Amino acid sequence: MNIDKYIAQFNPLIASYSHFIESHELNIGKRAKGFAYIHGFLKFIDGSVLDFKEFIEGNTRRTVKYKYGYNYRRNTKILFRYDNANDPKARLLKSFPHHKHLENGDIIESSPVALKDVLREIEILLLRNLS
């Protein structure tokens, strides 16, 4: 997928979860040719917030996500976070650099994730908590 198509998928993806999203902000900064920084937040109907960021590079044929972080929180308390940061505490994981931080402070293995994966996980949590 080229970089423009990759970027264009964000607004429709966010709109598809509008029944759970109270407000949002999406910022797309195209840097040098073929580079972009995508970041923002989604505030959900229960007051929880997902802060996200992606650093991507692309051309007419493909897009590569170099760095990402999806931080799901309630106020300042982290509920979970996915990222591929060079975290020394995650170096021994088989999935390194990809990992997930849990609410209790543990760090576990994770496959590379995308915003759509994180939104699905949050939707399940919201449905469980709102029932």
Image: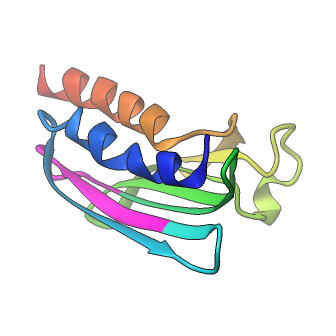
Q: Between 78 and 44, which is closer to the camera in this rendering?
A: 44
70 sits left or right of 75 in the view = right
Q: Quadrant of the C terminus?
A: top left
In front of the other: 131 or 83: 83
Q: Position of residue 53 (x, y in %)?
A: 49, 63
The color scheme shown is rainbow
- Judged left or right of residue 21, residue 2 is right
Residue 69, how many percent across, how many down?
55, 58
* Magenta span main SS: strand
Residue positioned most to the front: 60
40 drawn magenta: yes
Residue 15, picture quadrant:
top left
Q: Is residue 116 magenta?
A: no
Q: Is residue 124 left or right of residue 70?
A: left
Above or below residue 44? Residue 17 is above
Task: Specify the segment rendered in magenta.
Answer: 38-50
Which quadrant of the rendered structure holds the N terminus? Answer: top right
**Mark count:** 0
Q: Position of residue 81 (x, y in %)?
A: 51, 51
Query: Can you say whether 119 is above or below 70 in the image?
Result: above
Q: Position of residue 6 (x, y in %)?
A: 51, 47
| Residue that appears at 23% across and 32% down | 16
Q: Residue at x 13, y 27 (%)?
A: 130
Residue in the picture at 15% in, 38% down:
18
Taking the spot 56% from the left edge, 69% from the top edge, the residue there is 36
Q: Is residue 101 above or below residue 27?
A: above
